[in-house]
Each structure stands twice: as C-alpha cells, then as structure tokens.
C-alpha cells in the first residue's frame, strides 16, 4: 500500500478561505474606503504550495484541518479537483475554517490578516496518523500558519525518516525555535522574513545576502531568499551565493506568488533530485512569474500545460 501511496510532496500546513477586496489603496487606520471588486478563493500558504506542486505534476498530499462548515466542505472539493490527496485533512466541529482577509491595491500591493481557526487545532496526534505517508514521501514542506510545534514535529519526523525537508517561515516570528533551522534541508523565506529573523536589514542585494548567510550559519542545509521582482538568492555554503533574476512580467496581483515559487521548488526537488538547487530556483521563478498575471492565489497558479516545455 505504501508503494502505491508514496507521495512526491507532502505538505503539513494551512488551509484558508481568502476573502479578497480590490481597492485603489490600503485604508489608513480608522478609515473606510470604497473597494471595486470582491471575490472568495482558496488560499492558505500550505495548501497554496501543495496545489502549485500538484498542478505541475507532483503526486501530493495535504495534512491539515478545516472546520465542519461550508468553507471546509468547499476546501475538500478543491483538493479533489486539484488531484491532492486529502485523506489526512480533518474537519473539526470546534473551530471555523481559517480565513484570510486580503486587500489588493491597484498598484499590486497587498495586506493580509489571517484568522487560523481550525488550522490551529491540527494536533501532533493527527500528524502521527500521517507518519507512514510522511516517511515514504520525497519532500515534506511546512510553514507557520499552524501551531509551530506541529510544524516542528513534522520536520523532525521527516528528518528521522531521511525525507528531504523545505521550511517556509511564514508568517515570520522573531523568536523562531532554533531547531527549525537545523531541521531544514532548504529554508526558504522572503526578504521581510529574513529581516525579522536575523534582525538585520535585507533590502539591498548585499543585505539580503548577509541575512541569508546568517540563516545558513544557524544550521540549514541551504537557504533561498526570494526578493519579489528582483528574483532570488540561493546560498548553499557560506562562500557561494547565487543570484537569480526574476522573469520580467506585468504583475496584476502578487498575492501568493511566494507560495507558487515554493510549491514549484518542492516539485523540482521531488521530481528532479539531481538538478542543482539554483536551476530549480530559476525554474520556480518562472512558475511564480506566471502566477502574478492573474488575480488571487490558487486561482492564478499555472498548470504544467500553461508553461514552457523547457521547464520540465
Ligand atoms: O501567501 C498568501 C496566502 O497567505 C493567502 O492565500 C492567505 O490565505 C494567507 O495565508
């Protein structure tokens, strides 16, 4: 059974219903402004990354918790529609499905407030039920929208079974348990997260590289720092940083582009294990660039057939 069920990528993480408003700008504190458009989509960093990996052709599974409500029912259908195994996604009567209130401005900026809801109830016991699937997976991926201890436990389980790990410390927390670094084969964050984690600026290329080196020094196997429209940095050893420019693109909505990048990276790590990390990151950058051309998170993620054949 386990051979049949061996997953390329297994994600232990969040599911959120994204409530997205488009507006000319972000409101100031205490201010009400008129928006232009509203839509509901499937989001949550964990599920976004999982769905992107699945759309590229990875065999994926999600370990998560949603509420026993209409958003939760919809989310289970969404996994089915995307070919993601949802046998480890529980529905709790004790909390609502997580939601993210997202405002996207005409200039493409966004601001997000999440309410974790049922995501916070995913327990280490439930995680234990997924152990056989984690143990046989090629890549395990975690973030920080569920209880950090659950993510840490998942990373430990994967490392004990010699499964390759990717950790995305988002949303970032300043007092991250040092074990997260040691348990990450690839630690992938954006420049804002790098700044919060290291306490150093990461705005310029030099600063981002310095922050990346500091993260690497904490024990990760490799560090990838995404820099939005400026591409990304890949650090595998203290002496070598590879800078990869982004694909120039007219961005409509960058929300979830980082998740598209990480989901794609997980796909390449699982399916092309001999490829250099820098090349994987370059290709993942192309996938993420495709995602910013449409509104929403998962609604904007490309399928394999939408992308150039040279990426596969
Ligand atoms: O990274 C984008 C995601 O962050 C959104 O889908 C939202 O749900 C929040 O989790």
Image (cartoon, rainbow, N blue to C red):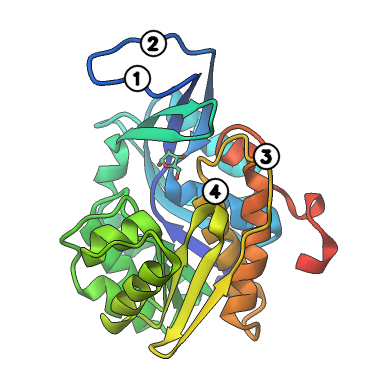
Query: Residue at position x 57%, y 34% from top?
Result: 296
Camera-nearest label, 2 or 4: 2
Residue 9 lies left or right of residue 172; in this view the side is right
Camera-nearest label, 3 or 2: 2
Residue 224, visible in the rendered structure:
yes
Tell me which numbered mark, 1 or 4, is placed earlier along the sequence.
1
State the residue in front, 94 or 147. 147
Read off the residue under disc 1: 27
Residue 270, visible in the rendered structure:
no
Give the image quarter of residue 97: top left
Give the image quarter of residue 297: top right
Camera-nearest label, 1 or 3: 1
Tell me which numbered mark, 1 or 2, is placed earlier along the sequence.
1
Instruction: Name the residue at the left extreme.
Output: 175
Read off the residue under disc 2: 33
Query: Residue at position x 69%, y 58% from top?
Result: 56
Tell me which numbered mark, 1 or 3, is placed earlier along the sequence.
1
Regarding mark 1 in the picture, which secondary structure is present there? loop
Instruction: Give the Cα distance between marks 1 and 2.
Output: 6 Å
Tell me which numbered mark, 4 or 3, is placed earlier along the sequence.
4
Regarding mark 3 in the picture, which secondary structure is present there? loop
Residue 118 lies left or right of residue 48; in this view the side is left
């Amino acid at each position: 059974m386990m051979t049949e069920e061996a997953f390329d990528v297994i994600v232990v993480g969040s599911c959120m219903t994204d409530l997205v408003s488009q507006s000319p700008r972000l409101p100031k504190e205490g201010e009400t402004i008129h928006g232009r458009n509203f839509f509901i989509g499937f989001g949550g960093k964990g599920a976004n990354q999982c769905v992107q990996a699945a759309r590229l052709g990875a065999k994926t599974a999600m370990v998560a918790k949603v509420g026993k409500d209409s958003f939760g029912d919809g989310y289970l259908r969404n996994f089915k529609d995307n070919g993601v195994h949802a046998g480890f996604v529980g529905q709790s009567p004790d909390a609502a499905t997580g939601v993210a209130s997202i405002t996207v401005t005409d200039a493409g900026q966004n601001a997000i407030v999440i309410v974790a809801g049922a995501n916070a109830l995913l327990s280490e016991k439930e995680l234990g039920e997924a152990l056989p699937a984690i143990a046989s997976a090629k890549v395990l991926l975690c973030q920080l929208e569920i209880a950090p201890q659950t993510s840490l436990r998942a990373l430990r389980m994967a490392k004990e079974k010699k499964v390759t790990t990717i950790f995305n410390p988002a949303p970032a927390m300043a007092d991250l348990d040092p074990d997260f670094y040691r348990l990450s084969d690839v630690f992938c964050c954006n420049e804002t997260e790098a700044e919060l984690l290291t306490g150093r600026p990461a705005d310029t290329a030099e600063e981002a590289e310095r922050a990346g080196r500091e993260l690497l020094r904490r024990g990760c196997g490799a560090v990838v720092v995404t820099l939005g429209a400026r591409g990304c940095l890949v650090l595998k050893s203290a002496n070598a940083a590879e800078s990869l420019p982004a694909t120039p693109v007219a961005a409509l909505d960058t929300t979830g582009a980082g998740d598209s990048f990480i989901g794609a990276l997980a796909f390449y790590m699982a399916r092309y294990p001999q490829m250099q990390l820098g090349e994987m990151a370059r290709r993942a950058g192309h996938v993420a660039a495709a995602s910013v051309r449409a509104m929403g998170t998962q609604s904007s993620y490309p399928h394999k057939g939408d992308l150039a054949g040279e990426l596969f």
